[in-house]
Image: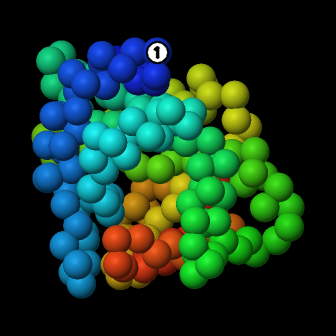
Amino acid sequence: MHITVVNTDNAAAFEKRLQELRQIQDLHRYVPNKEQHSGFLLTMTDASKLKSLLERGSRIYLAVEGADLAGYLIATPHQVVEDLVAASPENTLSFDYQEEEVKAKEACFIYQIAVHPKYLRHQVGVILLDYIRKNESSRHLLAGIATFPSNNHVSVAFFKAYGFSRIGRMSVKGDGSKIDTDLYLC
């Protein structure tokens, strides 16, 4: 398995893989008011939103096995998180301790991670996290795991097994709904 990094420098790779990203998201589509047990809670991310994230310094890491897209991870600078929270007075960001807030501001934020069902239990998520730990300049990784409207037990177990610990909460309103998120730091 190899990792391809998509950023503004190689937008052609982004365009080529966009359909595959959509297919993975379709397989993991969030159904409101139902608990998800089989994978990560995803919000649909369209091409314009992905391009906007790339333009703001985010990177998309594609895990490729042969000709298959096995999974992906979108990592953003922490400033993107702060901008998201600042976008509405209803949005909140809080940390359990001040030292964790300082670490979080130095962290690379895991915006989204997904693995194709064919590659579940093949360590694709771990491979992606290992890759960004090794290649990103951030000392820490920060992940948000939705707690409302769904308890995403699979994500919590995955991130805890990797070494993440809960450090705070974020609440963001978007597209007419509110999503509460626990923040985890590694």
Quarter holding residue 50: top left
Quarter holding residue 56: top right
Callout 1: SS: helix
The residue lying at 36 percent from left, 20 percent from top is: 11
Percent coordinates x, y for residue 167 in the rendering: 68, 67
The residue lying at 41 percent from left, 24 percent from top is: 6
Image side of residue 64 versus residue 51, left or right: left
Position of the N terminus by quadrant: top left
Residue named by callout 1: 9
Confirm whether residue 169 shows in the render. Answer: no
In the rendered image of this protein, does residue 124 appear above or below residue 149? above
In the rendered image of this protein, does residue 180 appear above or below residue 115? below
The residue lying at 62 percent from left, 56 percent from top is: 83
In the rendered image of this protein, does residue 26 appear above or below residue 154? above
Percent coordinates x, y for residue 72 in the rendering: 34, 37
Percent coordinates x, y for residue 124 in the rendering: 33, 36
Name the colour scheme.
rainbow
Pick the residue in front: 65 or 23: 23
Quarter holding residue 42: bottom left
Confirm whether residue 179 shows in the render. Answer: yes
Percent coordinates x, y for residue 109 in the rendering: 58, 48
Pick the residue in front: 177 or 27: 177
